[in-house]
Amino acid sequence: MKKQSLFPVIYGLISALISFIAVFFVCVRSFRLQLPSSILIAGILAIFFFGLSYFRGHASVEIKRITAKYQLTDQDLAQITGLKASDFPIYHNQLQLILPKRYWPRILDALQKYEQQREQVEK
């Protein structure tokens, strides 16, 4: 397994652990819920946050992978996604994702379409 493919899993696990602990203590101390129901609620929210963080980490890795694979510049990314070139700063030959996370699915979708088009042309 590659190091980059582990990132979303580790990111998701850390997020899930933090959310479980936080929700558990809020349920027990603030809402004064019993232990089993606090664990159940904390577990459900931990699963939700694991999924959310996993997909965000996966999107980040994929966006950076496609950018590096095709050596895309900020101008290329702006043209592909329809956003501004200043939204895609590249430092030390690596893309810095400074855009809000809500834009990442749109960027990832555009870059995956770009990758598919490039692969079809190369065949």
Image (cartoon, helix red, strand yellow):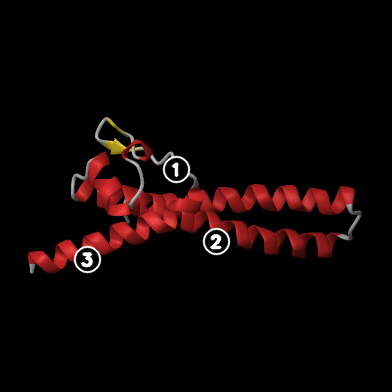
Res 46 → quadrant: bottom right
The label nearer to you, 1 versus 2, is: 1
**Under tag 1, what secondary structure?**
loop
Residue 66 in picture, x, y percent from top left: 26, 52
Residue 23 in picture, x, y percent from top left: 75, 52
Q: Residue at x 26, y 49 (%)?
A: 79
Q: Is residue 37 visible?
A: yes
Q: Residue at x 27, y 40 (%)?
A: 74
Q: Nearer the viewer, residue 6 or 48?
A: 48
User: Would you say 49 lies left or right of 77 here?
Assistant: right
Q: Nearer the viewer, residue 87 or 115?
A: 87
Which numbered disc flags the more N-terminal residue, 1 or 2?
2
Which numbered disc flags the more N-terminal residue, 1 or 3?
1
**Under tag 2, what secondary structure?**
helix
Residue identifier under label 1: 99
Residue identifier under label 2: 51
Packing grade of label 2 (10 A; few <14, some 14-19, many >=20) is some
The C terminus - image quarter: bottom left
Packing grade of label 3 (10 A; few <14, some 14-19, many >=20) is few
The label nearer to you, 3 versus 2, is: 3
Badge 2 amino acid: Gly
Residue identifier under label 3: 116
Q: CA distance from mark 1 to mark 2?
A: 20 Å
Q: CA distance from mark 1 to mark 3?
A: 24 Å
